[in-house]
Image (spheres, helix red, strand yellow):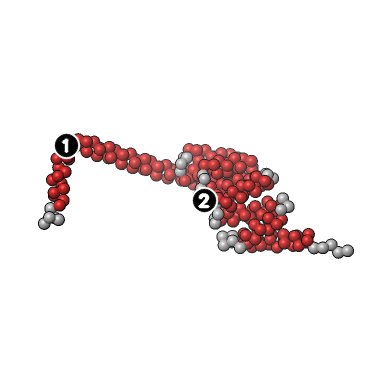
């Protein structure tokens, strides 16, 4: 009986306090209700914005402006990203702008867009892709030291990812172009045996054998 009466006893003891503070409690309840209402309103608005952004991106991908060149199309993606900033579609639009410019050979402008994405995202798949694109843009411009620096950034910051494997392969290519064959061989060998390399592993193995042959030829004693 004593256990069954415990809740009633607690309420009996609290009743005077509840009556004395009923106005305060009513005010707190109103504040909580307003806060909950604002939260759901903002969440609903964000959901609607995400949907609108996704639809706008799909429309632009499916039906781009007629006769639009790469720069004009990239600008359209940038404008969409700015209009719907903070949405997943805006991030994809920004990346699409950068890749559109890169594919068209506008490497300096692609570099600017990749750099914006890399600065805005410190982690995640988008950050890895943006940094990889930035490094590739530097490489395409012939800025091999900057390219190597950014490929190394992807390797260090996004280890055990597919982007890191691609960065190692690309870094090996840059190092080989710079004449750093032993360093290039090390990275090609890593890619060759990387679980995530896929077909890139086979290509890395071919390059590794080529470099091994070059190194062997340079170390062979000259015939007298």
| Quarter of the image where the N terminus is located | bottom left
Which residue occupies the extreme bottom position in the image?
223
Which residue in the protein does label 1 denote? 20
Which residue in the protein does label 2 denote? 125
Q: Is 186 situated left or right of 4 in this image? A: right
Rendered position, 19 above or below 224: above
Residue nearest the viewer, comparing 109 with 55: 109
If you read the primary sequence from the N terminus, does the residue marked by circle 2 or circle 1 appear first? 1
Residue 61 seen anywhere in this rendered image of the structure? no
Residue nearest the viewer, comparing 49 with 212: 212
Q: Position of residue 79 (x, y in %)?
A: 52, 38
Residue 149 seen anywhere in this rendered image of the structure? yes
Q: Position of residue 206 (x, y in %)?
A: 68, 62
User: Which mark is on residue 6?
Assistant: none
**Residue appearing at x 19%, y 35% in the figure:** 23
Q: Is 21 situated left or right of 183 in this image? A: left
């Amino acid at each position: 009986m004593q256990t069954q009466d415990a809740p009633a006893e607690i309420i009996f003891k609290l009743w005077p306090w509840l009556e004395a503070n009923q106005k305060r409690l009513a005010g707190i309840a109103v504040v909580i209700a307003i806060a909950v209402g604002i939260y759901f309103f903002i969440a609903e608005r964000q959901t609607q914005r995400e949907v609108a952004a996704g639809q706008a991106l799909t429309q632009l991908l499916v039906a781009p402006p007629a006769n639009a060149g790469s720069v004009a199309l990239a600008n359209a993606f940038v404008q969409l990203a700015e209009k719907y900033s903070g949405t997943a579609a805006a991030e994809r639009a920004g990346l699409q702008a950068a890749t559109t410019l890169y594919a068209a050979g506008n490497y300096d402008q692609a570099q600017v867009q990749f750099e914006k994405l890399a600065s805005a995202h410190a982690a995640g798949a988008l950050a890895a892709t943006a940094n990889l694109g930035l490094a590739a843009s530097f490489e395409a411009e012939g800025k091999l030291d900057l390219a190597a620096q950014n490929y190394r950034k992807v390797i260090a910051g996004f280890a055990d990812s597919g982007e890191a494997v691609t960065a190692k392969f690309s870094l090996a290519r840059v190092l080989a172009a710079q004449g750093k064959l032993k360093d290039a061989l090390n990275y090609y060998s890593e890619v060759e045996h990387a679980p995530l390399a896929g077909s890139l592993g086979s290509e890395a193995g071919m390059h590794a054998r080529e470099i091994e042959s070059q190194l062997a030829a340079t170390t062979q004693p000259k015939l007298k």
